[in-house]
Image (tube, grey):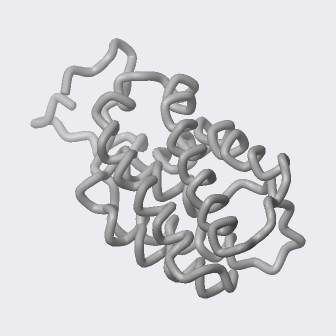
Amino acid sequence: MIMRPGQALLLPANPLFIALTLVLALATNLLPLGRHPGWPDLLALVLVFWNVHQPRRVGVTLAFVFGLVMDVHQGAVLGQHALAYTLLSFGAVTIHRRVLWFGALSQALHVLPLFLLAQCVTVLVRMAIGGMYPGVSIWLAPVAQAALWPVASVLLLAPQRRPPDPDQNRPL
């Protein structure tokens, strides 16, 4: 991939760090907070982030498993979050090459439709089984997730930005 001027060369992502961030995002979603409908889904954010940056390591299958865990935890229709996370991951893998060409703010605008689509899927599944419409505030969550994208980019790429060990034989 041709790099933009001023863009740093990143070290390879550590698979243990990827797994740790996904487990921490899952744990954050599992916390018994008084969840507002507009609260961002951090697991969805981290899944999309790693699907964009490491599509071969985090894929649709892992998103499906995390979705089933969220369904069981929230007592939702089995498959509601699994379907949403699977569509999110598929969309992120599909657009990952294009998204990486842009800066963090432009990337946030590119992933916003993915978050909106996932929210639409969860609302439609909930309403299809006879649930009530949760209200307009539910649409704040995808916007909040997209707003958190630049913060996630800084935090999750920080270990890859550390300088490599200097060596006389390597120019990088």
Residue 156 on image: x %, y %: 51, 50
Residue at (50, 73) in percent of width and height:
67
Q: Is residue 111 above or below residue 20?
A: above
Determine which quarter of the picture holds residue 28. bottom right
Residue 155 on image: x %, y %: 57, 47
The quadrant the C terminus occupies is top left
Extreme-right residue of the structure: 34
> Can I make out residue 42 in this image?
no
Of 106 and 14, which appears nearest the observer? 106
Q: Is residue 131 left or right of residue 20?
A: right
Residue at (57, 37) in percent of width and height:
112
Of 149 and 41, which appears nearest the observer? 41
Q: Is residue 77 left or right of residue 57?
A: right
Q: Is residue 105 left or right of residue 92?
A: right
Extreme-top residue of the structure: 5
Of 159 and 154, which appears nearest the observer? 154
Residue 24 on image: x %, y %: 59, 71
Residue 154 on image: x %, y %: 56, 40
Q: Is residue 140 left or right of residue 15?
A: right
Of 119 and 168, which appears nearest the observer? 119
Extreme-left residue of the structure: 169
> Can I make out residue 64 in this image?
yes
Residue at (33, 37) in percent of width and height:
95
Determine which quarter of the picture holds residue 169. top left
The quadrant the N terminus occupies is top left
Residue at (78, 52) in percent of width and height:
138
Say how many tags the image has. 0
Q: Is residue 149 above or below residue 131?
A: above
